[in-house]
Amino acid sequence: MAKVVFGMTMSLDGFINDAHGKVGLLYPDLRALGQSQVMQEALRTTGAVVMGRRTFDAPGDPDSYAEDYEFQVPIFVVTRRPPETKPKENDRLRITFVGTPEDAVRQAKEVAGEQDVVVVGGPSIGQHLLRAGLVDELQIGVMPQLLGSGQRLFEHLADLSITLKKTRLIETGQRTDLYFSVER
C-alpha cells in the first residue's frame, strides 16, 4: 500500500522561505541536491505526486513538466479552477486536476500502487493533509540558516497535537534530512 510522504526544506528556525518569499538560501546548490542520495531515493520510490495549484503554476510553462520535472510520474493538482488547455503529458507523466486534497491523495494512492505518494509545494496542502490524518511520513530537510521571518512550515497547526517517531537521519553536506513516521 502506498504511503503518503510530505516533505519540505526549511531553515533551522522553521521557515520555508524568507520575508520576500524567496527560497534561494535554502537551496544553494540544486544540482548537488538533485544528485544526492535523498533525491535519488525519492525518484526511485515515488509513484505519484500531489501538489497545489500555486506550485503547479510556479514554473510558468505547464508543458515543462512533461520534459523537465524530476518526478516523471502521475501528478494530481489540487485546484478549483483547472486550466482551459490540458498541459503536455508523456507515457509516464499524466496531470489530473482534482477538487480537494483528500481526493487527490485517494487517486494518487490508486495509481502509485506500492510506491510512495509525495506531497510537494507549499505548507498549506501538507498542513491540510496532516489535519485530515492522511500523511504517513514527514521528510524535513533542515538547512543551517536562520531566516528570521517568512512562511513557517507548521504555522497553522498550533491546535493540533501530532506524535512523530524519528525513523531516519541523513546528512548531505550542510543539509540534514530528518524522516518521521506519523504515529496514529
Image (spheres, grey):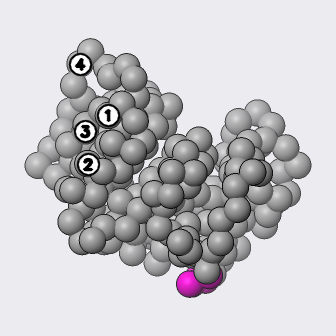
Residue at the left extreme of this rendering: 91
Q: Residue at x 83, y 51 (%)?
A: 147
Return the residue nearer the eye: 2 or 70: 2
Q: Are marks 4 and 2 in contact (CB under 8 Å)?
A: no
In space, the residues marked 2 and 1 are separated at their CA atoms by 9 Å
Q: Mark 1 highlights which residue?
A: 98
Q: Is residue 30 magenta?
A: no
Q: Mark 4 highlights which residue?
A: 85
Residue at the top extreme of this rendering: 84
Q: Mark 2 highlights which residue?
A: 107
Q: Is residue 113 left or right of residue 144?
A: left
**Residue type at the position of mark 3:** Ile
Q: Residues within 10 Å of mark 4 (few under 14, many from 20)?
A: few
N-terminal label among 4 and 3: 4
In space, the residues marked 3 and 2 are separated at their CA atoms by 12 Å
- Residue 152 seen from this side: no
Q: Is residue 56 left or right of residue 88?
A: right
